[in-house]
Amino acid sequence: PMVDVSDKEMLFTLSERKPIREVYGSYTYFRDEDVLLAKVTPCFENGKSGIARGLTNGIGFGSSEFYVLRADTTRVLPDIIYYTINSNRFIESGKNQMTGTGGLRRLAKDYVVNYPIAIPPMDKQIEIIEHINLEMAIVEQNKRLIEIFQQKIRDKIIEVWGE
């Protein structure tokens, strides 16, 4: 379901398991290492996208409101595609490429298919991904520190002022 894919996390965990006969033909098929991109409002604008990894039997089925992007891993890593489609530039530019009216607009497939993407040599892609992952780990550690100190502040206020 759309709710299983985050607008903040690259990887996602599927909440449901069903027999293939219940989903085949009715849902969007994807497999390990595919990149999912929400194509409907407001999910696209919020950056709902992710990389499928660790799926049961290596396959999954989801909402028809996802584009499934499959990397040719001899040329480009899924992480590079994910970071590209999750960028502000891609999302902001894509907002102008949505079709439909009212509350249910969709990102045009042509926009996704024709969006230019830089593909550095494979060793550089790995280096970029490692650098981003390192930076993201630091961000997560800092978020945790903020939570700890916010709790300490709340505890001190209660100690001084009471509840």
Image (cartoon, rainbow, N blue to C red):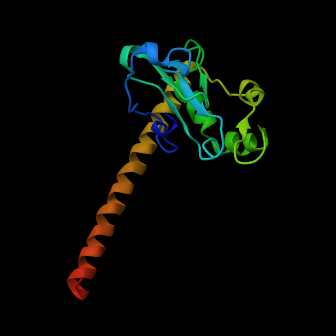
Who is closer to the viewer here, 86 or 120?
86
**Residue at position x 33%, y 61% in the image:** 147
Q: Position of residue 92 (x, y in %)?
A: 71, 46
The vertical placement of 159 against 108, above or below, is: below
Residue at the bottom extreme of this rendering: 161
Q: Give the side of residue 10 with respect to residue 162, left or right.
A: right
Query: Based on the displayed image, in which of its 4 quarters is residue 76 positioned?
Result: top right
The vertical placement of 151 against 16, above or below, is: below
Q: Position of residue 5 (x, y in %)?
A: 49, 37
Query: Based on the displayed image, in which of its 4 quarters is residue 13 positioned?
Result: top left
Q: Give the side of residue 55 with respect to residue 93, left or right.
A: left
**Residue at position x 44%, y 44% in the image:** 136
Residue at the front extreme of this rendering: 22
Q: Position of residue 85 (x, y in %)?
A: 63, 35
Q: Position of residue 158 (x, y in %)?
A: 24, 81
The vertical placement of 131 against 78, above or below, is: below
**Residue at position x 51%, y 14% in the image:** 24
Q: In the rendered image, which quarter contains the C terminus?
A: bottom left
